[in-house]
Amino acid sequence: MESNRKKLSDIKLSVLDLVPIRDGKPIADSFANSLELARHVERLGYTRFWMAEHHNMPGIASSATAVLIGYIAGGTSTIRVGSGGIMLPNHAPLIVAEQFGTLESLYPGRIDLGLGRAPGTDQVTAMALRRDLQGSVEDFPNHVAELRQYLSASNSTARVRAIPGEGLDIPVWLLGSSTYGAQLAAILGLPYAFASHFAPAALQVALKVYRENFRPSDTLKEPYAMACVNVVAADTDEEAERLATTVYNSFLNVIRGKALPMQPPVDDMEGIWDRSEKFAVQQMLRYSFIGSQRTIRAELQGFLNETQVDEIMVTTGIYDPSARQYSYELLAEACKEVVKS
């Protein structure tokens, strides 16, 4: 049984970039830093570079996700670029089909379409986005089906067609932080990505639901699961822990209901959070791997043993762009057979 265990060197590594807006820095810097990161991880051999749709958040610049995908894909050459995800309740399925059909036509074989059913924002902003208060996230399965129909070659005789988009091979992923997305991905025979970087509680049961209920489809014969985790790597455990205080403060602000740009690291979190806040942040960040290359390798291998996922997506909330790039470099090396001494 142990021989069937996956090794880190056997699986794909990918990136989720939240396009952070750093405190005191212009938003244009966020886009430039993300492009530099995408080029860096492409050279390191990462498989995908995804961005997520968020709205009305002063610390995240990825609201116009499809536009940014075009920017990143246009500035790279081989890495897959996509959405992790497009929040489908905010959009007409036809618009999404046309946008991603355009992207796939411009950058063939490199575009992924990850779909989520949450709004990616607060409820007031969600209403401003939709303009239709009759809509519901419970319509998500129908919207997914409509979108996939627009992308299919069989839609060529329909009255409403996605041009470009129709007949293109654009991988559709379902995203989730609960068992809902896992069940739907299994029924539709689609790849599934779980947001364990901020919602770790349901990871194991969601993977179980997905694998046990998976139905082979024309696009996927066997279940394919990816989990997103937080990684902060540095030369020492102590330096990584200091860099990770940026992540801690980001999640602390979520708990406190504060909307702030990304904050620089601090020397000590004690005195910033109280005991209950610290516990809450630690629960949300259960699947966070912080430390030196050796520490990261051991802990990530443990995560892989526990979950047996097919791919690991990593988000790295480091304030300094060069330190963020270096973290991904250390991670890529750590997942190979040889680790620096």
Image (cartoon, rainbow, N blue to C red):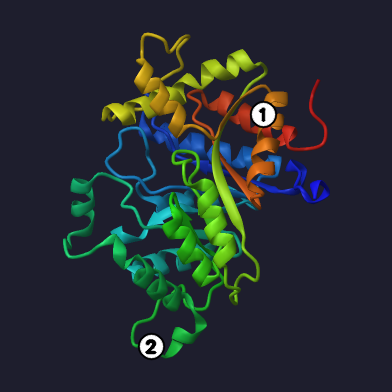
Residue 328 seen by the camera: yes
Q: Secondary structure at mark 1?
A: helix
The quarter of the picture where the C terminus appears is top right
Residue 7 percent across, percent down from the top left: 76, 44
The residue nearer to you, when weighing 309 against 60, is 309
Does 77 sit above or below residue 318?
Answer: below
The residue nearer to you, when weighing 190 against 274, is 274
Residue 178 percent across, percent down from the top left: 43, 51
Residue at image position (56%, 47%) is 227
- Quadrant of the rendered image containing residue 132: bottom left
Residue at image position (47%, 19%) is 245
The residue nearer to you, when weighing 91 against 142, is 142
Residue 104 percent across, percent down from the top left: 52, 65
Residue 314 percent across, percent down from the top left: 57, 40
Which mark, by number, is residue 3? none
**Are the residues flagged by discs 1 and 2 in contact, CB closer than 8 Å?**
no
| Side of 332 relative to 22 (left or right) | right
Which mark, by number, is residue 296? 1
Identify the amino acid type marked 1. Ile
- Quadrant of the rendered image containing residue 115: bottom left
Residues packed near mark 1 inside 10 Å, few (<14), some (14 to 19) or many (20 plus): many
Which mark, by number, is residue 158? 2
Residues packed near mark 2 inside 10 Å, few (<14), some (14 to 19) or many (20 plus): few
Q: Secondary structure at mark 2?
A: loop
| Side of 200 relative to 58 (left or right) | right
